[in-house]
Image (cartoon, rainbow, N blue to C red):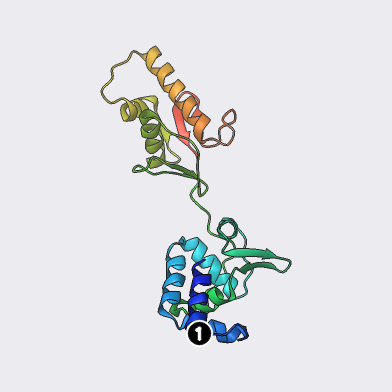
Amino acid sequence: PAFMKAGSIALADGVLRIEDDAAVWTDALLARPEFQRNCREIWQDLSPPEQQALLHLRQGTPVVGDAVQDLQAMGFVRATDAGATIFSPIFAAFLARMPATSTPVPAPAQEAAHPPLVADPASGVVWRNGHPLDVTLTNHEHHLLRYFLSHPGEVCTKDDLMAAVWPDDVLIDGVRDDRLAQLIKRLRAKIEPTPAKPTYIQTVRGRGYRLSI
């Protein structure tokens, strides 16, 4: 809509005519401050992987991965028989004129992988492979996950986990073990792709648990 509005204003101002070719439209619109501002706002709203994907597409480099799929879902990339293409030739021209594109961007062998698990302490959102999970963690579940994430690959004893989640509670062994086991079961149900066959929170028999990422 912003691009259409800018084009309509240019027509009304007499800067452009309907019969002008695409190159004239591109040069005229990119010379207008309001159009440049619209393009910059679009660019700044994109994540670094999405920006990188657009730059590669502008250079004619085939790109696949989550970033391209996200751009397509937002309408910034269209799927064609020849592959993905930027939604607007004028926006593609804007990218070509950006200082950052004066040096060719090397094509990656593959898109950088997202961290397997991320827990945002401020929002409480849990991300798995770059995608937010539609789950809500309790305070105890969040404390437990944060502790695991701060000790990836390490065997965390039951005492370590209990101290991280319930630092002020004193429980006898049987009650303590059951309480921790139930909490881990609930957390697995929320973050594991297949909770019955956990791939992240693994039981280390006789020792405790380990976060494998």
In the rendered image, residue 138, in percent from the top left (x then y), is placed at 39, 30
Report the residue at 54% width, 35% height from top: 192
In the rendered image, residue 32, in percent from the top left (x then y), is placed at 44, 81
Q: How packed is label 1: few (under 14 Cα within 10 Å), some, or many (20 or more)?
A: some
Return the residue at label 1.
Answer: 28
Q: In the displayed structure, would residue 70 be above or below residue 132?
A: below
Q: Nearer the viewer, residue 64 or 212?
A: 64
Report the residue at 49% width, 80% height from top: 12
Instruction: Find the residue positioned furthest to the right.
Output: 81
In the rendered image, residue 72, in percent from the top left (x then y), is placed at 60, 59
Instruction: Find the residue positioned furthest to the left.
Output: 168
- Could you tell whether 64 is left or right of 187 in the image? right
In the rendered image, residue 42, in percent from the top left (x then y), is placed at 46, 66
Q: In the displayed structure, would residue 207 be above or below residue 119?
A: above
Residue 66, picture quadrant: bottom right
Please give the count of numbered marks on the rendered protein: 1
Q: Nearer the viewer, residue 188 or 176?
A: 188
As helix, strand or loop, the secondary structure at mark 1 comes to helix
Q: Nearer the viewer, residue 15 or 133?
A: 15
Q: In the displayed structure, would residue 133 be above or below residue 97?
A: above
Residue 102 showing in the rendered view: no
Report the residue at 38% width, 34% height from top: 142
Residue 93 showing in the rendered view: yes
- Could you tell whether 4 is left or right of 85 in the image? left
Residue 54, picture quadrant: bottom right
Q: Amino acid at mark 1?
A: Ala
